[in-house]
Amino acid sequence: MLKLTPVVLAVALLAASGAHAQQAADPQADTAVLVAQASEALVEAATPADAMPVAAAQSHEDWVADFEQRFGQAIGTAADGRVFYAGMAVISGDNAADPHYGTQLALAYERAMFDMQADYILQTYGRLKARTIRSLFEDQSSNKDAFDPVEFQKAAADGGGRLEALFDKALVLVDKKLDSALAEEGVPPDEIQKMSVEQKKNLYKDNLNKEIIKSAYQSMQGLVPVQTRIFPIQENGKSSMAVAVIAVQSEKTRQFAKDIARKRPSLVKGTPKAVQDLLPADKKGYLDEIGLRFAYDTAGRPMLLAYGRTSVPMDPDWSASRAIRAKQNAQSIAQTLAESNIIEFMNTNIQVSETTNVGDINEDWARQITQIDNGKPGDVQQIKEQIRETTQTIVKSGKAQAVGELRGTSILKRWEEKDANGVVHVGVVVGWTYDQLDNANAIDAQARGKTGAQASGAQGAASDQSRASKVINSKNDF
């Protein structure tokens, strides 16, 4: 089982220790500063996903608890302007060998992120309306089991439809030749000979129903995953794959979200990192990655990495050209998913509602069935019926909408890999960097006939010198 970025943890602690050593002249320096610095370094780290093997034993709850222990902060609690959230969603299918498995992983990630945001919005900004209905009735009369004599007219009105038509004819023709008259009207002989009238009465009722409606509408900025995990989960004696996400929202991430939405320089700074150090070392590592990452470029300016992925349900009967086109289309989908994660980071408006209905039905009924033979009451049968039911329903609905410009984004990596089950995964890594924003602004200025463009931030080492930038050759054509 892969641990939660122990290398990053060690680097963060060493960095914090180095900063403390420079202040060795102050023997009273609080060691809490070291912890805060290490925690901040961890939050800034672009943590890779923890792709668990099939035999993984760690549960989702243990994984979250391990994260809380390592970061020193409980999920859902605010500390130092920072809040962590946890979410999980299972894939739609139960077969990791499904050709659509890669797409199912992407959708499970989207579901986990949406549910995480919805839960936070409801908890923080939601309004709740509760309604409870209680009904109690008991008939202890001495004649509670007695029924009124069968009345054709009333039975017809209660029965309606076909039964009502039969009774109407019976009432009109009761003193005439009933059988022949009904037969002339097209009524089947077996229906003419025998019909039945049911009477019901409620003897006891003790019911409770509670309806709870929660709703909220709010915008959310700067929510970014710190770590994702793809792992098997077992329930009801069966196994499925799940995607778990631990995300963070802090003052830094919110401020950066505002800055990139407005295409302006950011005062947020962090530990410089090269893109090649953030991306997986080999293609197999991309199978572990999904979703968004927050990091800092070589100039210490904030940046985003978005891992979009899907799968190609390859058909053996396809020609080579058809298969190539399918992969290209799948990568286009993966790229769009990655870009949407960046835009949603800038600002997402979420509207959610949740309706819960729980109740208890406890009723006693008496039924009397009277057989009608040629228009006259015949045999009578009485039945006692008990209803004992528990009702429990929940309905959740919501929608999230994000709108933003793609300027500042670029494709850092396209990849294709086949997993152990033979499923073909394809993916695209899209980055948002100030280097790319500067390039896009400069090109736009040239197109408008200007001599130069306003720099959006301090110039640093170009991230496009990394291994990922070599893949996106078209970037140099802009």
Image (cartoon, rainbow, N blue to C red):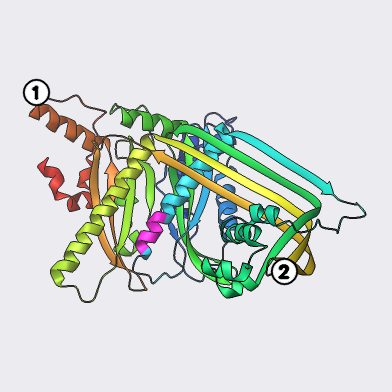
- Measured Cα–Cα span from mark 1 to mark 2: 96 Å
Q: Which residue is mark 2?
A: 371
Magenta stretch bounds: 102-107
385 versus 250 height, above or below: below
State the image coordinates of residue 418 (x, y, percent, origin top left). Answer: 30, 69
Q: Main secondary structure of the magenta part?
A: helix
Give the residue type that dot 2 points to. Answer: Gln
Numbered mark located on residue 450 in the image:
1
Position of 392 with respect to 43 (left or right) is right
Which of the two discs, 1 and 2, labels the residue nearer the N terminus? 2
Relative image position of residue 457 (x, y in whole percent):
26, 28
Q: Position of residue 141 (x, y in %)?
A: 91, 51
Tell me the quadrant of the picture where the C terminus can be found.
top left
Which quadrant would residue 441 be assigned to in this image?
top left
**Nearest the eye: 272 or 253:** 253
Looking at the image, which is closer to me, 75 or 319? 319
Q: Identify the residue shown where x is 65% and y is 56%.
A: 156
